[in-house]
Image (cartoon, coloured by chain):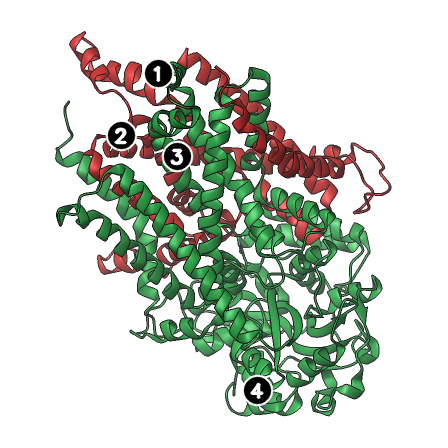
Chain colours: A green, B red
Amino acid sequence: MRKYTGIWPKLYVAICFAFFYLPILVTVIFSFNSSKSLSRFTGFSLRWYSSLLNNGEVVSAVYVSVTIAILATVISTVLGTMTAIGLSRSRRVLRDAILSMNDIPILNPDIVTAIGWMLLFSSLGFQKGYMTMLLSHVAFCTPYVITSVYPKVRSLDPNLANAAMDLGATPYQALTKIILPMIRPGIFAGVLLSFTMSFDDFVISYFVSGNGVKNISIVVYNMTKRINPTINALSTIVIAVIAVILILMNIMPKLGISISDRQKNRRVIAVALVVVLALVLVSWLGKMSTGQAEKRELRVYNAGEYVDPELLTRFEEEYNCTVIYETFESNEMMYTKLLAGDKYDLLIPSDYMIERLIREDYLQPVDWSLISNREALNPDVLNQAYDPGNVYSVPYFWGNVGILYDTTVVDEADLADGWDLLMNEKYAGNLYMYDSERDSFMIALKALGYSMNTHDEGEIREAYEWLLRQRDTMNPIYAGDDVIDNMISGNKALAVVYSGDGAYIMAENEDLGYFAPEEGTNLWYDAVVITKDCQNMELAHEYIDFFLQEDVAYANTLYVGYSSPVQSVYETMQAEDYAGLDAYVPRVGHPGDEVFHYQETEVKKLFAELWTKVKAK
Amino acid sequence: MRHFRHLKTPYLIWCVIFILVPLALIAIYAFTNAGNEVKTLNFTLNNFIRIYEPTYIRVFIKSLELGVLTTLICLLAGYPLAYIIAKCPESSQDMLIMAVTVPTWINMLLRTYAWMNLLSDNGIINGMLGLLGIDPVSMMYTNFSVLVGMVCNFMPFMIIPIHTSLRKMDYSLIEAAMDLGANPFQTFRKVVLKLSMPGVINGVVMVSLMAISSFVIPKLLGGGQYVLIGNLIEQQFVSVGDWNFGSAVSLILAVLILLAMHFMKKMDVQVAG
């Protein structure tokens, strides 16, 4: 048999691997970055490694990801291999039926599968958490095992097993000595696929888990708002561990420790089981040491990267309680989870969502007599239309929406155009819009002089025309939170941003300026609310009160970058840490500024449909 | 010979609970308009009629195009790699396949961020071009950047199954074909390709399914203007809250894919037979 020894195949392999490993190399390099940026390397530092070790959320996510991936792989490999062998001996009709059903989780978009299982678990009354996540991982990995193993089983000569049994082997022996060794490559492929799928899954895990159980992907996705190299540090460690294992496996034979395939398989399984057992033991010991006295529990559901994690630890220590802290990517995602019956004590949504939750009777009133720091609140952020008199909500952060511009490119005189600056052809192809239908329509409606809460279809259509015109003449990029890193690197001259993000970006890139157009803009408030499911009202109020303490609010606003509702902190930040950054100081009392109201489904559908039309040319 | 037949029974039960029941729930949503109330069912076809609209049809076509293109590139680039790996000494094959798989264990979002970083206007590649005196090339938010990200992410899922079927191939068949006067191209087409067909089909199915319904990579590397079916479905379920329309879209997608798979299987039977 001729082996390829020429230079071309080697070169080809090298190019392919360079392509696969290039992004990983970048990930590793930026884990040593001294600043938060993922695109500008400012200097060598190990700070993200130390912050990784101090981040309890990440450490527990690693535990969840690894154990779930290993357990799901083991269970689905056994289940899938059994099924594949069983199928090859079944009647055709049944076989085709099972194989078609098996394809469904693979071919459905993740989000549909996820919602399907979320509904299933809710209707069965399962408590969402580790078990539900494991069950769904087994459910979506098994089809991949079957698709890898079944072709191998099919190509197997059935007479081999028969011959073995004729010669006196028991069915079990025929299975383990004849069938399994022959389909080994298929099983190996199935193991690799399911581990990979499980380890990297986000959408399904997010919707089927709860009660504070998070895997690495969930943590990373919720960090996208303020992505920082902590997670690169984590990936670098993962890569290093895998590399060490691979090298050990590779040099063991060279050191004279020869192992057969069979032994190798057993060893791999043994190592996997030991890892799982060790992790389970560690977590169990951890629970034993912390959970001896019955501690009070508080389930908090907040946006991703919207709190300084050290403050949560401090609260737990000072009030002797456990905070089960979960995060969401958007208000709508939070609402979807509530709809599916997930239970929390405290939520931190935005204005229009609070309005909706009040209307749909999800909330209970705040007892202001328990909030000792109520006087510290800035009167400007209280008593807004979404919750008059703040019956249900205590402000957490606030801000507006404006335009971030590169002072070295954009002419100051053009700023007088207001929102129409985004229509100025001088900057065509040089701007980011925000990929959100409400914010984009807000801009168009304000530019045309209408209210951003309009229900008038004519006005909405006019705004749609404005956006179409802008798309055709300006060729904007509709970006998400990636705008933050893009603007820090100065990739484009203009961007629509939230004021808090603007302040954060400006602190990293001094060439930028921020302004809120004269025609008016969206003024927004994120606030803490107490759900009807709240089990510990006292603790919930203590949490709210804690975050209004001056030193706590200061640490929090410094970490997040958004404007604090606590008057004294807000003033200190303007005078010291964020001096000169206009974006930290949202405009107050401007006649054109409005707060979003809750939209009826029909209006919302119209906005979504028109926005899809704008984006998909 | 019915010895191992009963081995599939647990999965049959599992399928009913984890696949059929949720699918039925989705189908009920697709054919009703009763909001999110399941108690009062008002059957309707409106959700399907709404899809018949130029924008949505364009979204479907664009997703299919992107899916086909990604799959094709993965196949054309991945097959040679799988073939070369399968020709390596037995001892290093597992290692090489591991090396193909390991990158997928690094969070997909992080890898995509790394690509953004490489491809952006002030990014690493343009920085290097600048050192060579070449003007920056705008690569981000184009078809190119989306394809790079998708191919980099999905190619391992093409390579693994193809390699699995090539690995246990009997190489004396190739020699026999050559001895019998087949040229290398004929040998490849009539022997190697044919024998690796189950793996190719498996890989094509897996990659095309993932590519058609993916939305995170296109969104990050292509910008918001890259609306695909995945985005549309996600938007309906999460941000608009119109589960009925979202279910209808995903049901149509599922039917389209099932049809495509049916043809693939027919091809499989033809090739194998």
Question: Where is residue A508 drawn, in percent x and y?
Answer: 44, 76
Q: Which mark is residue B83?
A: 2
Mark 3 or 1, closer to the camera:
1
Q: Is residue A558 left or right of residue A321?
A: left
The chain holding disc 2 is B
Residue A426 in sight in this render: no
Which of pointers 3 and 1 lies earlier in the amino acid sequence?
1
Residue linked to disc 4: A554
Label 2: how many residues lie within 10 Å, few (<14), some (14-19) or many (20+)?
some
Question: Where is residue B236 drawn, in percent x and y?
Answer: 68, 47
Determine the CA span between mark 1 and mark 4.
Answer: 79 Å
Residue linked to disc 1: A167
The image quadrant where one finds the C terminus of chain A is top right
In the image, what residue type sits under mark 2? Tyr
- In the displayed structure, B267 sits above or below A333; it is above
Residue A569 in sight in this render: yes
Which of pointers 1 and 4 lies earlier in the amino acid sequence?
1
The chain holding disc 4 is A
Label 4: how many residues lie within 10 Å, few (<14), some (14-19) or many (20+)?
some
In the image, what residue type sits under mark 3? Ile
Q: Which mark is residue A187?
A: 3
